[in-house]
Image: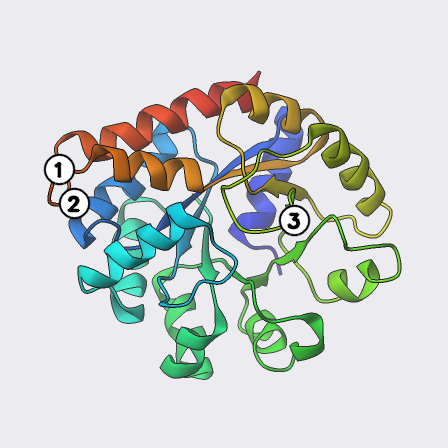
Amino acid sequence: MSTRIDQRFAALKQEGRAALVTFITAGDPDYETSLKIIQGLPKAGADIIEFGMPFTDPMADGPAIQAGGLRALASGQNMKKTLKLVKAFRAGDKETPVVLMGYYNPIYVYGVDKFLIDAKKVGADGLIIVDLPPEEDDELCLPAMAAGLNFIRLATPTTDDQRAPAVFKNTSGFVYYVSVLGITGTKAPDLKSVKANVNRLRKHTSLPISVGFGVKSAEQARTIAKDADGVVVGSALVSAIANSLDKKGKATAKTPKAVHTLVAEIAKGVRS
């Protein structure tokens, strides 16, 4: 099975460059603005889009993404509307890979079988579920793969050579390397250790490795793109949304543009 994710990484390998993977919380700050933001990401330079599934207790996320999730939930975003957002995006873009990222609880509540059928139907290509370890592969990973969705796993600086084979066993699409210990968007990645760890993990997998957590600038993206197959940017984009809102926390005309401008800037870094 070859998914849009596999095809995109293969195409970029031919081009000789890394992918820019962008994360946006679905429904942040509201459904319509979120759709405008997401629709403009490919033109701004995003190669793959992660749709964050808002959840009340996002334990791996830092203050920026937590706040984005709360804004989305306050505006009425739920799993149904997140899948609707993917469908609306997919209506105008058949090529860009879409990954649903988040926690297992909202999927469990929605119903695993129903979720997998609906996610596939609206045009999602893969899942990143941060709180399901390989020991729980029967819960979602194996059913997702059977449904034709990539199951993308996180690796961290503490994923040692003993642990790596278990982590990568049922992983597909790409590996998401978390460049810092802790929560999203709070620390800058140590670029030397990123390089060493990416090269070490390559001994355990032939999948593309994308690096995220803490990437904020074109310069960081440029450096990481030399060694990784992809660069993931999330908190910086969610912060750009937050900084564009009015005093009541509502979207302004500047909101989509703030995100697209930052994506275009970071895309230049990745492409250079």
Work out how far the residue at label 1 is from the one at label 3, CA to CA, in angstroms: 33 Å
Q: Amino acid at mark 3?
A: Leu
Assign a secondary structure to mark 2: loop
Locate residue 95, reporting x and y percent: 42, 44
Residue nearest the observer in this picture, 135 or 46: 135
The mark that comes first in sequence, 1 or 3, is 3
**Vertical arrangement, residue 127 with respect to residue 29, above or below:** below
Query: Residue 5: which disc?
Result: none
Residue at coordinates 31% horizontally, 43% vertically from top-left? Answer: 38
Please tell me how crowded label 3 is: few (under 14), some (14-19), or many (20+) other residues with Cα within 10 Å. Answer: few
Please tell me how crowded label 2 is: few (under 14), some (14-19), or many (20+) other residues with Cα within 10 Å. Answer: few
Q: Is residue 242 left or right of residue 64?
A: left
Locate residue 137, reporting x and y percent: 66, 76
**Vertical arrangement, residue 84 with respect to residue 229, above or below:** below
The reply to whether discs 1 and 3 touch (Cβ–Cβ < 8 Å) is: no
Q: Which residue is mark 2?
A: 249
Locate residue 193, reporting x and y percent: 76, 35
Assign a secondary structure to mark 1: loop
Q: Amino acid at mark 2?
A: Gly
Query: Residue 181: which disc?
Result: 3
Q: Amino acid at mark 1?
A: Asp
Assign a secondary structure to mark 3: loop
**Vertical arrangement, residue 221 with respect to residue 143, above or below:** above
Q: Is residue 120 left or right of residue 261?
A: right
User: Which quarter of the figure is the N terminus placed in?
Assistant: bottom right
Locate residue 146, reporting x and y percent: 59, 74
Residue at coordinates 27% horizontally, 70% vertically from top-left? Answer: 80
Query: Residue 246: which disc?
Result: 1
